[in-house]
Amino acid sequence: MAGSLVDRMVGAAFLNVGTYEEVEHDDTATGQAAAVVAMVAVATAIGGWNFGVTAVVGGAVSALVKWLIWAGITFLVGTKLFGGTATWGELLRTLGFAQAPGILAVLALVPVLGWGVLLVVSLWVAVAAFIAIRQALDIGNGKTFLTVLVGLLFSLVLSGILPGSL
């Protein structure tokens, strides 16, 4: 499959299920997915008025690490608890492209738009991620919701936010 990065980003942003299926099955799209994650991190840093090299590079590295971890968590939860049939790479690719709407976070630079843009973009990315997880795991909406919920709880435990965490 030879979908261009821009075409795939647009398809993912418009919540096109076919785009998620395409990147799920294209082993060569992992680099593109990583590029999307990094570009969104840069756009978010700029939208937050963080123009420094440290903020931009640090934000990109942090976003890439979080992407890897979240794909791993959703892979384990979705396949082991809810019968999904994805590989970690399939989740990695679909979740990477699900971040495509985040490129619009750069519009938070506009003073009147600011937090409103970030709120809309965050919700948009959350919906895209739901679709990405559902398509990669080949499960229904209910199991996808549970995968996300259990994954988030597991993430909170891992990060030490919940009492009694690791």
Image: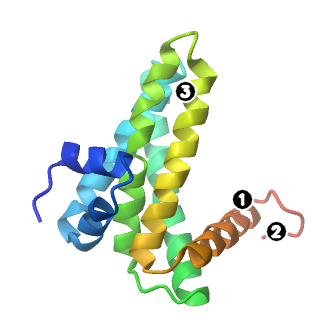
Q: Which residue is mark 1?
A: 159
Horizontal side of 26 relative to 138 (left or right) equals: left
Question: What is the residue that sits farthest to the left in this orientation?
Answer: 2
> At 10% from the left edge and 59% from the top edge, which residue is drawn?
2
Q: Type of residue at label 2? A: Ser
Q: Type of residue at label 3? A: Val
Q: Considering the numbered disc 1 on the image, is that residue within a helix, a strand or a loop? A: loop
| Image x and y of residue 78, in percent | 54, 80
| Image x and y of residue 81, in percent | 61, 87
State yes or no: discs 2 and 1 in contact (Cβ < 8 Å).
yes
Q: Which residue is mark 3?
A: 117
**Distance CA(mark 3)–CA(mark 2):** 34 Å
* Residue density around tag 1, few if under 14, some if 14–19, many if 20 or more, within 10 Å: few
Q: Quadrant of the C terminus?
A: bottom right
Earlier in the chain: of badge 2 and badge 1, it is: 1
Question: What is the residue that sits farthest to the top in this orientation?
Answer: 111
> At 54% from the left edge and 72% from the top edge, which residue is drawn?
74
Q: Give above or below for 85 relative to 7.
A: below
Which of the labelled discs sits on residue 165, or is there none?
A: 2
Horizontal side of 31 relative to 157 (left or right) equals: left
